[in-house]
Amino acid sequence: MALIVQKFGGSSVADRERIFNVARIVANTRNAGNDVVVVVSAQGDTTDDLIEKAAEITHDPSQREMDMLLSTGEQISIALLAMALDSIGTPAISLTGWQAGFRTNRAYTKARITKLDTERIESELARNRVVVVAGFQGLNRMDDITTLGRGGSDTSAVAIAAALHADRCQIYTDVEGVYTADPRHIKNARKLQEISFDEMLELASLGAQVLNNRSVELAKKYGVELEVLSSLNPIPGTIVKEVADVEGMLIKGVAKDDNVAVISILEVPDVPGISFKVFGALAQKKINVDIILQSVGRDDSKDLTFTVPRSDAELALAVLRENLSRIGGTDIKVDTGVAKVSIVGAGMQSHSGVASSMFEALYEANVNIRMISTSEIKISVIIDQAEADRAVAAIHSAFIH
């Protein structure tokens, strides 16, 4: 007997028909002789609807109350799915995140899991029940409800799989696996049979929306084999696991991220400690910085340019303006009309010509590069957002046949 953790996203449980479709998938897995734990997200656009309801009340809700509000979406899903399973003869019980043992830190809306006590889950499995768990949520040490941020249900599922030493964690979505590019925009995108944790982590971090990067980090850390597959089309998906052989380098995917803003601080003093003051101030507000460029010093000053998530651009600008007298500099500019396009492939560093081929494809597509970042398994460029789809198509055509 195997233990399988299955996670279903909001689109998979969006209405009655899809809830029963999920129930049949779960029942079939259990009837094959497996123990099953199911993690579900809020139905369809429920989370967005709840955010809109909060906006009707106030434009500045407390993060604690937002967590209290948003956590209700998953509770609706787990109750309905448990009812559906019971109605088709599969014993099931629904558990909230805290009933399932999730404890987190105190960072409302972006909480991190600090502890997972699986005693209740194991007890219910021993009673021959399918356990349906609300993803995305937990309790902090004040017993306040917290949520795990974007993609939190993926993280919940992987955490349960790791804690229970599950045989596999299946992530069901509305696509059939991990593709070399977004198949909705690139017609010849190919589904991958398997991909390494590192490659998947880069793709997730760079804008691919199939898996949340925190869930991939957790899976890699604890060796949880993932499978990404469709809840609507019963065919094999993509396996995400540790892949040892990277000698035959292959570009695994092209990703686009629109959630990017470029911030430039002009003419900051060319003295030690300026970068610390800038990025230290941003770190205190938990603003992630990605690509960083610093110009060559001239006339005792330099320009500092970097990217942040577009969703954090307004806050970053406020923080920097508040600290401008301490940092120095004559002006701060923000550009939100950009996108990040990236290629990912293990073994890239040991194969020459990858960067030149990418840049050639962009040149032939008449796309101007504004910033470049590289690592062992990825190359990212910042370009105008209006050119992003054309850039992805050109790069995909150059590398993936």
Image (spheres, rainbow, N blue to C red):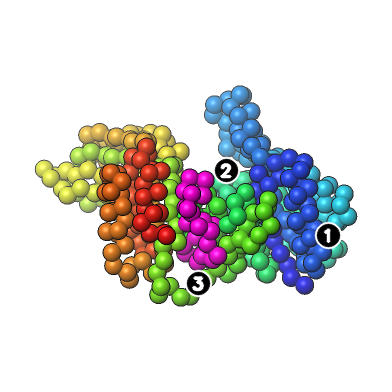
| Residue 334, above or below 121 | above
| Residue 56, above or below 221 | above
Q: Amino acid at mark 1?
A: Arg
Q: Earlier in the sequence, mark 1 or mark 3?
A: 1
Numbered mark located on residue 243 in the image: 3
Q: Nearer the viewer, mark 1 or mark 2?
A: 1
CA separation in Å, label 3 and label 2? 34 Å
* Residue found at x 71% / y 64%: 4
Name the residue carrying label 2: 109
Quarter of the figure with residue 126: bottom right
Q: Say whether marks 3 and 2 touch (CB < 8 Å).
A: no
Secondary structure type for disc 2: loop
> What is the crowding at mark 1: few (fewer than 14 residues within 10 Å), some, or many (at least 20)?
many
Q: Position of residue 247 (x, y in %)?
A: 40, 75
Numbered mark located on residue 129 in the image: 1
* Residue found at x 73% / y 67%: 3
* Residue found at x 33% / y 35%: 334
Q: Which residues are magenta?
A: 178-200
Residue 356 visible in image: yes
Q: Say whether residue 311 is left or right of residue 307.
A: right
Is the N terminus in the top left, top right, bottom left or bottom right quadrant?
bottom right
Q: Amino acid at mark 3?
A: Val
Q: Is residue 263 magenta?
A: no
Q: Nearer the viewer, mark 3 or mark 2?
A: 3
